[in-house]
Image (tube, rainbow, N blue to C red):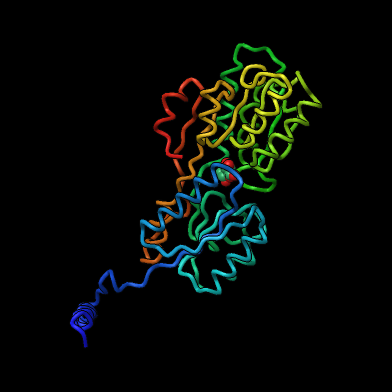
Amino acid sequence: MSMQRRTFTAALAAASVVGAVPAFAQKKIVLGFAQVGAESEWRTANTESIKSSAAEAGIDLKFSDAQQKQENQIKAIRSYIAQKVDVIAFSPVVETGWDTVLVEAKNAKIPVVLTDRSVKVKDDSLYVTFMGSDFTEEGRKAGRWLVEKMKGNAGPINIVELQGTVGSAPAIDRKKGFEEIIKADPKFKIIRSQTGDFTRAKGKEVMEAFLKAEGKKINVLYAHNDDMAIGAIQAIEEAGMKPAKDITIISIDAVKGAFEAMMAGKLNVSVECSPLLGPQLMSAVKDIKAGKPVPKRIITEEGIFPMEVAAAEFPKRKY
Ligand code: GZL
């Protein structure tokens, strides 16, 4: 037996006597992650955070991109169950339709972590924890900024709304939070509301339809994410109007593209929604494997960035 082999065997024997297995001999934790897709700058930054954090944590990451289709996420979760991974994590593309596959994971004794978006299930023991933003509060922040901005304006203030993916937690809750604030003053009216599916292309297409139907009646655009707002800005310019001047534009995420649009004077404000969930996810995965308790809800702390502060903030941004 070679010298190395003898040393290794001796180390293992010694360790097993004291009960501690040396780090180099511990089996790597295997995490199966089912991502929504690659629909926005936010999602790309979220994927980068998860992949880099898994590498840093020494966690073996199996990763899938569902191209925003629930059936693909369910397929990926089933494949992780079949591979007997240690933990499954995913960002549910929509809130409902998860009970069956999560029961399968529970029966396979594989703990599940929700990141970014939550689910509506009959039994919330089907997941260990949900970590992500408070989307309703993000909608309230957008509403409060608009109320403040329009304080001296008697109205009517006609708003068009680009909603996120139909049935997704951010789309449902950002709408709810925004309406909760603006309903206090009847001068605010949402005259058109339609999904742009969180993408630039769809955001532009739907804004073109809004402009065709309502034109100069539109005073405000509320977009559930920056990518749709950036697409809409193109449509507004092509219609010969000035974004952030003729039409006040509010969006959510605070990705780099939003800061660039604010510095160019084309977007009025972006509410922060941090995609940097990787470190929190890896620490939760390790705690779960170590049998430590994990809070049922982990909320990410976030701010709001009006265009006036964009240039000063931009160099500090991490996504
Ligand atoms: C929010 C996230 C949303 C972002 C969009 O946490 O789920 O999905 O706001 C992304 O940019 O597509």
User: Which residue occupies 51% across, 36% down?
Assistant: 255
Residue, far bottom:
1
* Residue 5, quarter of picture: bottom left
Answer with left or right where residue 6 lies relative to residue 79: left
Q: Residue furthest right?
A: 213
**Residue at left offset 28%, top offset 70%:** 24
Q: Nearer the viewer, residue 154 or 258?
A: 258
Number of residue marks:
0
- What is the residue that sits farthest to the front in this orientation? 2
- Which residue is more in the foreground, 175 or 27? 27
Ligand 1 visible in quadrant: top right
Residue 123, position in %: x, y? 59, 62
Q: Quadrant of the N terminus?
A: bottom left
Residue plotted at (60% across, 43% down):
170
Residue 288 figure quarter: bottom left
Q: Nearer the viewer, residue 232 or 303?
A: 232
Asked whether, in this view, residue 160 is left or right of residue 89, the answer is: right
- Answer left or right for 51 relative to 196: left
Residue 169's spot in the image, x, y percent?
Answer: 61, 46
Task: List x then y, in percent, for residue 317.
Answer: 43, 35
Give above or below for 257 relative to 2: above
Residue drawn 36% across and 56% down?
Answer: 56
